[in-house]
Image (tube, rainbow, N blue to C red):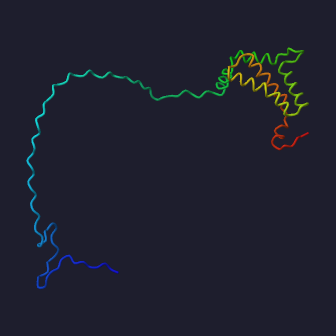
Amino acid sequence: MPDPIIPTKIIPGGVPLPSGPPPPGAVPPWRAPAPAAPPPPPPATPPAVAVPAPEPPQQPDPQIHVHVVLPYEPEPEPTRWQRLWGWATSIGRPWQIVGALTLASLPLFGGHSAATLWASAVAEARAEGGQDAGYALALTPLAIAVIRIVQGGGTLGRLLLLAVSLVGLMGAIDLYDPVTWITGVDPS
């Protein structure tokens, strides 16, 4: 349904039609012109303000000198050997590490060292008591040595215990252990 037509101007009969649309801004004859705007109010005079006495000159702020060097070059990443040396020296002093490794591998007991005697004892425990007994016997002193080194630092005695227990762990390890752990099949 179309929109209804709403007339905006009705021209009575016998009156001539306008010649065209009114010019822009023209006031229709049936409207009275808008009254003129009232004159603006007179400007108000601002009240008199007392001028304060001039303040004494302030001391200049202290100057801060900032020295910036551009471009910034960060320190280079440490090499693999520097990281290894840093880790080794964090465990103990280099002479302690060398001394502990020497004492662990020095043949003192009838041509056998402390490390090889411990490894054979762990291997015998694995053969007699099984895989669990071998690993328990090998990992217990290793765990004690690591805990003591982490808590109190590396001394010659603690590093010697670490070196001997690491070699003893080699007596507990068998190459078929990962196969047994993954598949559950015992190779024997």
* Relative horizontal placement of residue 122, taking residue 95 as reference (left or right): right
Q: Residue furthest bottom?
A: 14
Task: Work out whether 19 lies above or below 35.
Answer: below
* Relative horizontal placement of residue 45, taking residue 140 as reference (left or right): left
Residue at figure coordinates x 55%, y 26% from the top left: 75
* Relative horizontal placement of residue 157, taking residue 118 as reference (left or right): left
Task: Work out whether 182 lies above or below 24.
Answer: above
Residue 82 at x, y percent in the picture: 64, 24
Residue 155 at x, y percent in the picture: 71, 16
Q: Nearer the viewer, residue 69 or 87?
A: 87
How many numbered discs sit on the rendered protein? 0
Q: Quadrant of residue 103?
A: top right
Q: Quadrant of residue 58?
A: top left
Q: Nearer the viewer, residue 23 or 145?
A: 145
Task: Work out whether 167 lies above or below 178.
Answer: above
Residue 188 at x, y percent in the picture: 91, 39
Q: Quadrant of residue 45?
A: top left
Q: Nearer the viewer, residue 88 or 46?
A: 46
Residue at figure coordinates x 81%, y 25% from the top left: 167
Q: Quadrant of the N terminus?
A: bottom left
Residue at figure coordinates x 12%, y 73% from the top left: 30
Residue 142 at x, y percent in the picture: 77, 25
Residue at figure coordinates x 46%, y 29% from the top left: 71
Task: Work out whether 7 lies above or below 128.
Answer: below
* Relative horizontal placement of residue 75, taking residue 121 as reference (left or right): left
